[in-house]
Amino acid sequence: MTVDPSKPYHQIGEVAEVVGLSLRTIRHYEEVGLVIPSGRSTGGFRLYTDADIERLQLVKDMKPLDFRLEEMRELLVVLDAVEDPTSSSAQRDALASRLGEFARAAEQRCARLRRDLAAAESLTATLTQRSSGRGAGDEGAP
């Protein structure tokens, strides 16, 4: 794989720090074909472009929404095809429709996370209140 000298490249340690993923996770995403580094140094080190970093960030953002690896892979393929200038108008329409499905799924999953967060915050407030010696029914007590 040749490296384009006109692009800035980043080694995996820098990428891990920027994206907030472990080296192991980034290597795993490469192994399963989600994010392949754009090049290798003469010493064999993985080299990532800014586009690779954006792709890793997208994968990381899908994780809390419980997207499976297959779904992540499909979404990345769809996004790549949307950006492909050779895609026909009909292909773009189909891709836009599929992206809409992903957007709806993401929104549903966000709604679930919001409900879960509200429940967790309620529990935290209850525990905080009870740990300070104020039990249920003591709201008016000094």
Image (cartoon, grey):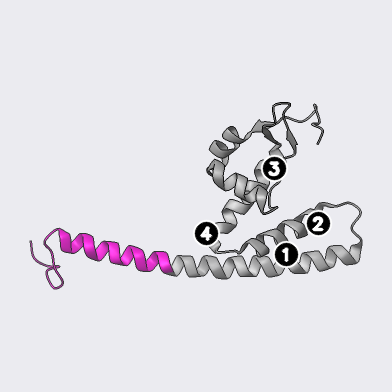
How far is mark 2 from mark 3, CA to CA? 17 Å
Mark 4 or mark 1, earlier in chain: 4
- Magenta residues span 116-142
Q: Residue at (81%, 31%) from the top-left corner?
A: 4
Q: Position of residue 86 (x, y in %)?
A: 92, 54
Q: Position of residue 135 (x, y in %)?
A: 13, 68
Amino acid type of the residue that numbered disc 4 sits on in the rendered structure? Pro
Labelled pair 4, 1 in contact (Cβ < 8 Å): no
- Residue carrying label 3: 52
Where disc 4 sits, the SS reads helix
Where disc 2 sits, the SS reads helix
Labelled pair 1, 2 in contact (Cβ < 8 Å): yes
- Residue carrying label 1: 99
- Residue carrying label 2: 82
Please name which of the two marks, 4 or 1, marks the residue nearer to the observer.
4
Q: Residue at (60%, 45%) from the top-left corner?
A: 26
Where disc 1 sits, the SS reads helix
How far is mark 1 from mark 2, CA to CA? 9 Å
Mark 1 or mark 2, earlier in chain: 2
Q: Which mark is residue 64?
A: 4
Neighbour tally class for label 1: few under 14, some 14-19, many 20 plus, Cα within 10 Å: some
In the image: residue 67, left or right of residue 3 = left
Mark 2 or mark 4, earlier in chain: 4
Mark 4 or mark 3, earlier in chain: 3
Neighbour tally class for label 2: few under 14, some 14-19, many 20 plus, Cα within 10 Å: some
Q: Position of residue 107 (x, y in %)?
A: 58, 67
Q: Quadrant of residue 7?
A: top right
